[in-house]
Image: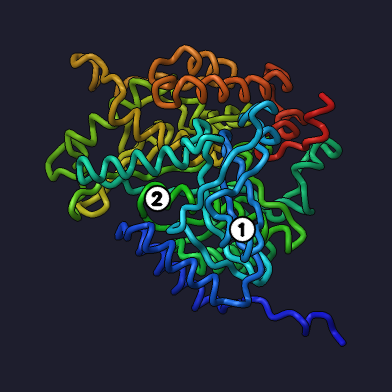
Amino acid sequence: METQSLRNFLAIPYDELEELNLAAKRQRLERVDPKTVEKERRKYLLEEKRIKAVTVCFSDLEGRFHMLDYDKKFLLESADNLTFDGSSIRGFSEISESDLKLIIDWPAFYWLPADIFGPGKVVVFGEVCAQDGSPYAMDFRAQLRKFSAHLFKKENMTLNMAPEVEGFLFKDTDAERKYHEKGCFDFISTGGYYHSLPQDPLRKFIDWSAEAQRALGLCNEKDHPEVAPSQFELNFGYTEATIAADQIQLYKLTCRQVASQLGLTASFLPKPVAGINGSGMHCNMSFNRNGKNLFHEKGGQDNLSEFAWKFVDRILNNATDICLALNPSVNSYRRLDPNFEAPNQIKASATNRASMIRIPLGNEKSARVEFRSVSPDANPYLLVYTLLRTGLEGDLPDAADSEGKRYRTRFLPDNIHDAIRHFKSSKIASEVLGEVAHGKYIECKQAAADRCPKELGTLVKREEVMFHHEVTNQLLWNIF
């Protein structure tokens, strides 16, 4: 007898998955009472006998994605007291106060493609609380969600975002963790921009990833190879900021999982190979109120409103201070190289793609600003929260100088040490992150910087891959 025939776990066709996930997404966008949603989800889990486990996921201070599988029956009985060891997660609690709690965000619930994640599982996002039940200072998903809810309640404003996340596809599984042995990555394709045949390995990866993300309700727009060899980009549509940040985590997880099943590695290192274009995570943002795009003003400068330009001016004025939140790794600063279309100039432009902020051509519906100086290894929650708070609350430049700062050529830090120095002394960074998280974040980034050669040079060093926060080989990190 085949043991497989004994199992009857949930496996939903992709078209049905998409309907389920889009319905759940609509509930979030329509701000359905979370208690109502929780009641629905609990009823569903209780009645659906083919679900064996619920994966509760959260992100740490640096943006690493963590997943804990809970037996369904246990979770339904103990959802108000889910604990985990925070001392095992870099940047979280000390051993003396290691126990942390997970609170389930029931509306952020996803049905998973069984061929990628295995049958019988669903995933739900969680938020981290301290032992006394208070919000945990290092969990920026919770901070982003609560600040966004506050904005909506107070100002009736919603921040919408559409990220453009680039990555690389390399030969062999676990290529990043083996980098210290080989000292290089092997391309799966050398075709370049758009050049990929329908059934070649890169296109198979892109197609499968796109199909899975569509089933997850990410609302794909376009998917294609990028400029560099073996590079890809999959775009999905505008949505509310916290949902968009969740989707970035699911996007990267899905890409890594699909690549692994193809015997390959999906990498979101900003610049894994020297001498070619790096990967970015351009973030298109705008605010909405009652269906009106608050960033649009017909006849305004570049058809943007005064509100939008003040948002831009605050970001430009504080660009060096917040750069570390947007470009968080040693490897990030290789990407900020002007020879490869890198957006390292602290200015706004409708045409210059080397500018930190681009003003795309837009109409009443599509007017937005595009933040280009963001690497794909940034913590998406910390990134969006930092841009949101800085753009709304940061110091404006002197009135006489504001327009000049939009166009004058200044540059972002070109190495992590300078970025850390600016971030450490920054008033706005400390206010946005809070004193404790600000200090912890600097500590994490300094630890990685200290493990790498100070000079970037012309070759990607083993250490900047080995000790990268999304790659870290725990054994190697502890031996150092």
Q: In front: 467, or 87? A: 87
Q: In front: 477, or 59? A: 59
In the image, residue 80 above or below residue 24: above
Locate residue 429, reporting x and y percent. Answer: 43, 22
The local crowd at label 1, few if under 14, some if 14 to 19, many if 20 or more residues have their Cα within 10 Å, is many
In the image, residue 42 above or below residue 293: below
* Marks 2 and 1, how far apart at CA: 26 Å
Q: Is residue 341 left or right of residue 367?
A: right
Q: Are marks 2 and 1 in contact (CB under 8 Å)?
A: no
Residue 173 seen anywhere in this rendered image of the structure:
yes
The local crowd at label 2, few if under 14, some if 14 to 19, many if 20 or more residues have their Cα within 10 Å, is many
Residue at (47, 12) in percent of width and height: 425
Residue at (72, 52) in percent of width and height: 265
In the image, residue 172 above or below residue 149: below
Residue at (51, 56) in percent of width and height: 234
Locate residue 71, reporting x and y percent. Answer: 66, 62
Toward which corner of the image does residue 369 lie, by quadrant?
Answer: top left
Residue at (62, 72) in percent of width and height: 51
Locate residue 472, reporting x and y percent. Answer: 73, 36
Give the mark nearer the N terminus: 2 vs 1. Answer: 1
SS at mark 2 in the image: strand
In the image, residue 467 above or below residue 7: above
Q: Which mark is residue 162?
A: 2
Question: Residue furthest toward the bottom?
Answer: 1
Toward which corner of the image does residue 353 lie, by quadrant?
Answer: top left
Identify which amino acid the numbered label 1 is placed on: Thr
Return the residue at label 1: 55
Identify which amino acid the numbered label 2 is placed on: Ala
Residue 277 seen anywhere in this rendered image of the structure:
no
Locate residue 52, reporting x and y percent. Answer: 66, 69
Toward which corner of the image does residue 50 lie, by quadrant?
Answer: bottom right
